[in-house]
Amino acid sequence: MTFSNPKILFVMAASAEYGAQLQQLIKPLMIGVGPVEAAVNLTAELANLTHQGKKPDLIVSLGSAGSQHLKQTEVYQAASLSYRDMDASALGFEKGTTPFLDIPAIVEMEHFLSSVPKASLSTGANIVSGEDYEAINAEMVDMESFAIWRVCEKFAMPMIGLRGISDGEKELQQISDWTEYLHIIDEKLGLVLQEMKREFGGWQDCLA
């Protein structure tokens, strides 16, 4: 699918990620931290917009992620998504798959920007730090993207996921270990969105 001046709903988890650069470009829906808050709040907003006849053409999820291997402060787009919290393997289901739901453990994304490198992304409700990364089969981690994708899938809507790497090189011990580079990620996400605007020939911000 190619996009031409689409109506976009931008979604973010936390105001700490919404810095000066992004504030000049978009008005995102703040969906909260973690998969439950993300799913509940995005579902409510999409239901409201659909009822008003303002259903977006595209969801763009953006914010921060952790990684031990990707370059800190650089921006990547999600090539695939997985849900690390789901484990019904004791009943014979593959780890990461939700029982009785026809969705694979790793979901391949379908929509991409031409200028942003891709990386696999694992979503869960826990903060990942230090040795926790050893159990995760993905290049970066966050707490919302799979939930966002699941809502988009339910509403038959395309999604693009953008994440700047905020942490992972050292063990997280306090909140400033996460927020230290968010201002740099804000600037780089802003540059990506400006390039996306050129690629799409403009966009309409659903909440602006």
Image: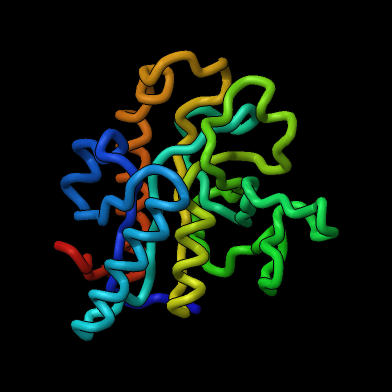
Q: Nearer the viewer, residue 81 or 58?
A: 81
Whether residue 204 can be seen here: yes
Against 9, residue 181 (above or below) is above
Residue at the image point whose x is 46% and y is 72% from the top: 158
180 left or right of 129 in image: left
75 left or right of 20 in image: right
Q: Which quadrant is the C terminus positioned in? A: bottom left
The percent position of residue 194, horizontal first and vertical second, equals: 30, 53
> How are the colours assigned in the image?
rainbow
The percent position of residue 22, horizontal first and vertical second, equals: 24, 45
Image-quadrant location for residue 166? top left
Q: Nearer the viewer, residue 85 or 184?
A: 85
The percent position of residue 65, horizontal first and vertical second, equals: 49, 37
Residue at the image point whose x is 38% and y is 65% from the top: 59
How many numbered marks have been drawn onto this rendered protein structure? 0
The percent position of residue 123, horizontal first and vertical second, equals: 56, 47
Q: Nearer the viewer, residue 156 or 160?
A: 156
Image-quadrant location for residue 205? bottom left
Toward the right, the furthest residue is 92
Whether residue 2 can be seen here: no
Residue at the image point whose x is 70% and y is 54% from the top: 96
Against 113, residue 136 (above or below) is above
Q: Nearer the viewer, residue 9 or 189?
A: 9
Against 19, residue 60 (above or below) is below
134 left or right of 109 in image: right
Residue at the image point whose x is 59% and y is 64% from the top: 109
